Amino acid sequence: MPAARNPSSPSAMQPGEADPRLLLQSVERALHVLEIFGSSGPPLTLSQIAARAGIDKSAAQRIAHTLLHLGYLERHHSGTGFTPGRRVLDRAFDYLISDPLIERATPVLLELRKTARERVDLSLFDHLTIVYAVRLQSKRENFPATLIGRRIPTFCSSGGRAMMAHLEDEEVEDIIARSERKPLTPKTITEPGKIRAKIAEARRDGYALAREESLLGEIVLATAITEEGRPVAAIHIAGSLGEWTVEEFTGRFGPLAIEAARALHR
């Protein structure tokens, strides 16, 4: 049987409306094999795939070679082990091109990036995590902060807290309770009472603020985009604490982020 899932894993967060009696275990196992590359780092040998996916080596071999045949895995250039295949990027493109919110948001984000001259991101709400779908870069970057598809826990991200500010208290408490609340940096706020206080600030101010909670030296504020009153995404503006005080940053970019999000509410 597959190993227990990380609560931050996409397949572990919300089972959706699927009838569990109709699930194909072979498909679930194959997708789980793809998922382990993100946390483990390529390349992975068959033995490592088997151990980290919680399956035997024979199953790992069959799954890996099926994914290799389909292009979702590739052999590492060293000849030892597997890495994610370029075919995976096709599915990311499929999602981005088909999402009407991303299409509507892109010109707004481009204009915001032009005005702010700092990094502008769009994240999507996925319950225990947010996932970045658009990232428009600024003059300095940490490599992971440039990539779409990156997930950050909802409880400690500015975008996550901005979206939690639009949820009922019962759902906020569920997210806090189910989150692992492991710190990403020494500055990450993990104590439930302090998280609630940050959400209350977001409800008051119209944006959420995070200082060095996912990347040291970085300050980020975010505002939620809602559809029929339900938060679905967030706009982030990120800068450097070496260039901005908190007061200057929020005074300059809070109104810009609120205005951009307002243009996308439905």
Image (spheres, rainbow, N blue to C red):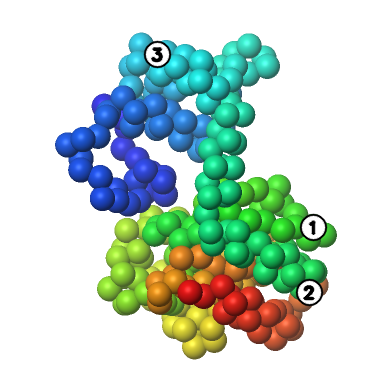
Residue hosting label 3: 62
Between residue 67 and residue 2, name the one nearer to us.
Answer: 67
Left or right position of 203 against 56:
right
Q: Quadrant of the N terminus?
A: top left
How far is the residue under mark 3 from the one under mark 2? 51 Å
Between residue 94 and residue 151, name the one nearer to us.
Answer: 94
Provide residue 193's location: percent of width, then percent of height. 38, 76
Q: Is residue 183 visible?
A: no
Give the structural element (helix, strand or loop) at label 2.
helix
Left or right position of 103 against 39:
right
Task: Give me the residue at 66% from left, 84% from top.
Answer: 255
In the rendered structure, which disc, 3 or 2, sits on the residue that comes first in sequence? 3
In the rendered structure, which disc, 1 or 2, sits on the residue that comes first in sequence? 2
Give the structural element (helix, strand or loop) at label 1.
loop
Residue hosting label 2: 115
Which amino acid is tagged 1? Arg
Task: Give me the residue at 76% from left, 73% from top.
Answer: 116
Between residue 161 and residue 30, name the one nearer to us.
Answer: 30
Closer to the observer: label 1 or label 2?
2
Closer to the observer: label 3 or label 2?
2
Mark 2 packing: few (<14 Cα in 10 Å), some, or many (20+)?
few
How far is the residue under mark 1 from the one under mark 3? 43 Å
Provide residue 96's location: percent of width, then percent of height. 57, 49
Provide residue 200's location: percent of width, then percent of height. 44, 83
The image quadrant that residue 257 belongs to is bottom right
Which amino acid is tagged 2? Thr
Provide residue 192's location: percent of width, then percent of height. 38, 71
Residue hosting label 1: 140
